[in-house]
Amino acid sequence: MLLNTLFKHWSYRIFAPGTLLREKYEALKRLLRYDIDCHEQMADFQELLHGEQYLDLAGIRLRFTRFSAEVAGMIDALDTMAPGRFPSLKDYHRKFDFYTRFLLAPPKIDAGPPFVLSLQEVNTNSKNIGNKARHLGIVQHNLDCPVPPGFAITTNGYHYFIENNDLRPQIDTLLAQVDIESHHSLQHVSKSLMELIRKAEVPRDLESEIHNAVDAWQQNNRRIEVAVRSSAVNEDAEFSFAGQYDTLLHITRDNITSAYKEVLASKYSPESISYRIRRGLGDEETAMSVLVQEMVNAEYSGVLYTSGIIHDADQDHLHLHVTKGLGEQLVGGAVIPEHYVISRHTPPVIRCPETESPSLTDDQVCEITRWGLAIEKLFGHLQDIEWALDGSGQLYILQARQLHNATPNEGTAADIIEHGHHEIILEGCERGSSGVGSGRIYLLSNGRRLEDMPMGAVLVTDNTPADLAGILHRVAAVLSQKGSRASHFATVARESRIPFLTGITDANSRFEHDSTVTVDGSRGVVYHGKVDSLLRQDSSSSSKNTYNKTLKDVLKFITPLELIDPQDENFSPEGCRSMHDIIRFCHEKALLSMFSAGRPVTGRGALRLIADISLDVFLFDVDGGLDLEKLTKQGAPLAAVTCLPFQALWQGLSHPDVHWKQKPFDWEAYDKIELAGGVPPRKDSFAFASYAVIGSDYLHFNIRFGYHFTIVDVLCGEDSDKNHCMLRFAGGGGDYHQRSLRINFLTQILEQLDFLVEKKGDLLEARILKIENVLLRRKLDMLGRLLGATKLMDMVLRDEEMVSQCVDEFFKGNYSFSQEG
């Protein structure tokens, strides 16, 4: 950590005559440690929002708890330094802490009865079951729809199960540490969570209610087999969770509680954890209710879409997908089903393009269609319906949920070919999900493993089981030999807008591994190479939107910074609008308190540097950093500074080619211009000033360049093994993208200067260790030039190409990037 060496030469003997000043010093060290940690954690939060990392809400809650405790630590440290001066600061911290915890809090949990509801008892007001069970209860009650008899084990039962076994603390601890980008981490956490569920006991009263519900069906000692299916909260809603949870078939009374636990355990399968976290939902928000229904001895089964999912022309048609026997192979993406297209007209026109001898009669197709349209009318939106026909021809509706279809792009394949002359590898594929994606082919064959697939690949696979949904964030597109648009995988692909084409004969031999292709899911075409015109047309939406919304709401109370000007009358506890404001306030007031304190030996506090550039600096000498005979009434001339690392860094900052008077970029008022350039508008206070603790060979420099802050910590002595330079850089006046570009510029320069660099969003830390004295001073000179050159770069940088150009210019000796033109 950067502050491990903070004030290394500032020993207790200096403060021996003054206990109070020693306490202030210790409090300042503590506050600055918290300050560094808090900024790192804010950078982590920003990275979660703007980057590609996802964290379970349990992990976000844990991080916020630690962060809030460190902000509280800063307040306590400031109170030690300035007792009783800011009593309301704790109140504002408690307020922001409360608001943030409220936003992150799980929903209210009810672990009391009822634990079981029959489908006849279910209605639109039933809040303790998921949509799968609720929708079936509603269509049965309102339409007298043919639904297999059954019951739902409520979310109350799930919460009771978790509470009775005291599993919540263990679940949250495991979820807080999962890294869903790491195959090993995801598998390890999933296995641990599923074992927790499987080893836990179903409470006796819950088990009794389940058995009683099954027994109510058993008339004349008839042995009943049931299907035990998930019906989680938020399943079959905005996000389908299609295929993410287990369904167990042919379950008897004797093993129903084991099956119940297995469905609960599937809540924590790797793909379920990844899917939920990427959608920004907490574990408690997807509490598991379970649907138990009498098994249907299906002769045929399938899925009905009451609209097309790809083309506008399909919106007036229903699409019926049919397979023989149970529908698990169909929704699991293991077969290519029969496909019927049915018009909405009366009488309907029925087409079955794939076969001349369809499995279903026209009457059976029409019956399924009538029920589909009736259910669509009842709910008021397009439907995705699972159904089954038993051996006697009796139809059963097994599931009804909203159909998430896709809006196609304009244009045709011919338009693209004519315009861009791109070679078509394949066309006429079944379109499971629209969108456009381009990448290198990854053939899942010849021993290649899914976990080794690179990011952005186009996956070619034999089939598409639902657990493949766990890798959708890593692919640009999916091409499959088997499967259909009616599979669970296709549903999730459409949610993520990942193009998915299926029904590709000899898929594994048709494509060359590692070759580049572009997949157009809307038109069912695969092109050779990268088709930029198609990629630009595509308006793919990110599945991270919901996750982002949660983080954006939370970060409103964490990262915004309102307290910019320490001279403003609003720079007060009452002016704080976020945790960041509290951090800024504590940091400013602590430094002001420390640097305005007198030293017990000399009676001097901090001295203003009299220098040749418009950077206001106060010096605090702790061990031979100043020649006392050269001090003046006005302060410390540069000639009085004997601190070697300060002189070396200042040489770079004051280099003649580093411009301190240039016109800044697009600021609205002179005060902001002054602030952004690091020039304090008033010279009679510590406001906006920079602070340096100096010794003969030690420097701790807190540099203010307007809206960004830099800390440089250096030991530059005769022992090269102990020498070091550590740098921390954060903030800026530009937007997040521009600040990140400036960090990228700094990173490239520093790495070429042999620094080890770590960056998180718009925060950078760099270090160079065990370096010879003379060489370190040369590095400090270049570092000074770099810091001077980057004062306003976040206001002018536009893209990575411009960053590269500026890096080249810097090493040519151009240190001014902030002028217009």
Image (cartoon, rainbow, N blue to C red):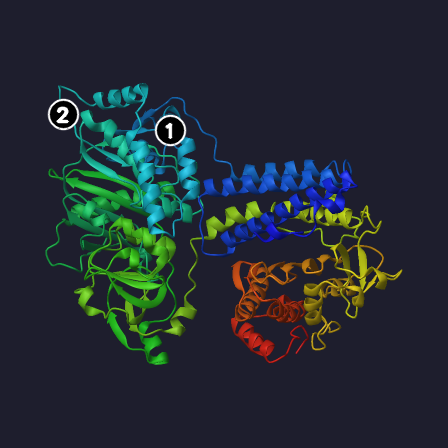
Residue at image coords 72%, 72%: 654
Query: Which residue has dot 1 on it?
Result: 162
Q: Residues within 10 Å of mark 1 (few under 14, many from 20)?
A: many
Q: On the rendered structure, is 265 left or right of 3?
A: left
**Relative image position of residue 162 (x, y in whole percent):** 37, 28
Q: Residue type at mark 2: give it.
A: Arg
The location of residue 319, given as percent across then percent down, is 25, 53
Residue type, label 1: Ile
Tag 2 and tag 1, C-beta contact below 8 Å: no
| Mark 2 closeness class: few <14, some 14–19, many ≥20 residues within 10 Å | few
Residue at image location 35% in from the left, 76% down from the top: 415
The numbered mark at residue 223 is 2
Query: Distance from label 2 to label 1 (Cα)?
Result: 31 Å
Earlier in the chain: of badge 2 and badge 1, it is 1
Left or right placement of residue 281 versus residue 147 in this view: right
Counting from the top left corner in percent of width and height, residue 243 is at 29, 45
Image: 123 above or below 62 = above
* SS type, badge 1: helix
The percent coordinates of residue 764 (x first, y second) are 57, 59
Quadrant in the picture for the C terminus: bottom right
Residue toward you, 316 or 788: 788
